[in-house]
């Protein structure tokens, strides 16, 4: 027999996540910013790091969003196989929570209902983007990662040939960050997806941004690749806000997925220094 979660319980939880994610930086992101502030040698870049930390403190004290771009509401949901959300179901509940949360916490509504012609704002920041993963059990883990337009616009994906190899992957990721310059509000966290199909590659690159900052991939080969790419990105000198500095990226996180014998998809998804996310388990 399936466990039933009330529709409104999901709505309330998602609404709270919207406020929390917009206002409070996760502890690992704050710690990374503090560490980089201590290591940065260029005065202007160091001053930016101090401003990021001050901004994070003000946001919590004043209960105000960290950034005016409160983002597209992107969710990663682990949905237990023995659980069910009553009423209209979990997708409707999540969207209702976004609608309520963005109004309750006075967050900017940034979503247009049609992307090319009229571009009319939905006025409630829905629909959300929701990635579902079925898992064993009777609980639901909901992770919200609001994604701002400045960093999202600097995403890149390339369908490489397997013969291109490691060096081409490194060059593609490094050049993607370098060419983005100050647009994604660096220092950035770099999510990299390798493998899968066109769409899966992009999804895992975004999911990589949720990993605790600087935690290496458990596969030592990919951990080594992360370290190499991070070193080369920081050697570009792009720096904070694209105005120069020792640190352009806080971390590089790679996720990989099996792929076709003829394919080597590689994607890059950047997150600004305000790497916002919040989660709840119901």
Image (cartoon, rainbow, N blue to C red):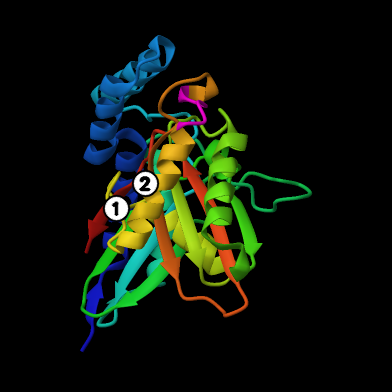
Query: Is disc 1 placed on a helix, strand or loop?
Result: loop
Q: Which residue is mark 2?
A: 227
Q: Which residues are magenta?
A: 235-240
The residue at the point 62 percent across, 36 percent down is 179
- Position of 149 relative to 117 (above/below): above
In what quadrant of the picture does the C terminus appear? bottom left
- Looking at the image, can residue 209 be seen? no
Tell whether 195 sits left or right of 46.
Answer: right
Say above or below: 130 vs 123: below
Nearest to viewer (mark 2 / mark 1) = 2
Q: Is residue 229 above or below residue 158?
A: above
Q: Report the residue at 50% width, 20% height from top.
A: 244
Which of the 4 quarters of the picture holds residue 63? top left
**Label 2 close to label 1 by CB (< 8 Å):** yes
**1 displayed left or right of 52:** left
In the picture, measured across the screen, residue 241 lies left or right of residue 9, that is right
Calculate the distance from the C-alpha at mark 2 to the C-alpha at mark 1: 8 Å
Q: Secondary structure at mark 2?
A: helix
């Amino acid at each position: 027999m399936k466990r039933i979660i009330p529709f409104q319980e999901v709505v309330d939880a998602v609404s709270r996540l919207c406020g929390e994610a917009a206002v409070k930086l996760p502890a690992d992101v704050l710690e990374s910013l503090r560490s980089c502030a201590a290591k940065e040698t260029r005065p202007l870049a160091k001053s930016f790091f101090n401003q990021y930390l001050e901004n994070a403190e003000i946001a919590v004290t004043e209960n105000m969003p960290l950034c005016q771009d409160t983002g597209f509401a992107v969710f990663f949901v682990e949905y237990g196989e023995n659980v069910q959300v009553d009423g209209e179901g979990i997708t409707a509940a999540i969207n209702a929570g976004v609608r309520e949360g963005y109004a309750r916490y006075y967050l900017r509504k940034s979503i247009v209902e049609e992307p090319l012609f009229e571009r009319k704002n939905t006025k409630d920041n829905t629909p959300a983007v929701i990635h579902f993963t079925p898992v064993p059990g009777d609980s639901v883990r909901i992770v919200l990662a609001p994604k701002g337009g400045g960093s999202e616009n600097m995403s890149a994906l390339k369908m490489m040939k397997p013969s291109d190899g490691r060096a081409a992957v490194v060059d593609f990721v490094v050049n993607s960050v370098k060419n983005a310059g100050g647009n994604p509000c660096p220092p950035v966290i770099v999510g990299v997806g390798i493998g899968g199909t066109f769409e899966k590659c992009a999804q895992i690159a975004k999911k990589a941004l949720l990993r605790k900052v600087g935690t290496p991939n458990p596969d030592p080969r990919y951990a080594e690749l992360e370290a190499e790419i991070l070193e080369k990105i920081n050697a570009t000198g792009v720096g904070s806000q694209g105005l120069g500095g020792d640190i352009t990226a806080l971390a590089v996180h790679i996720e990989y997925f099996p792929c076709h014998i003829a394919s080597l998809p590689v994607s890059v998804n950047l997150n600004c220094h305000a790497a916002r996310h919040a989660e709840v388990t119901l």
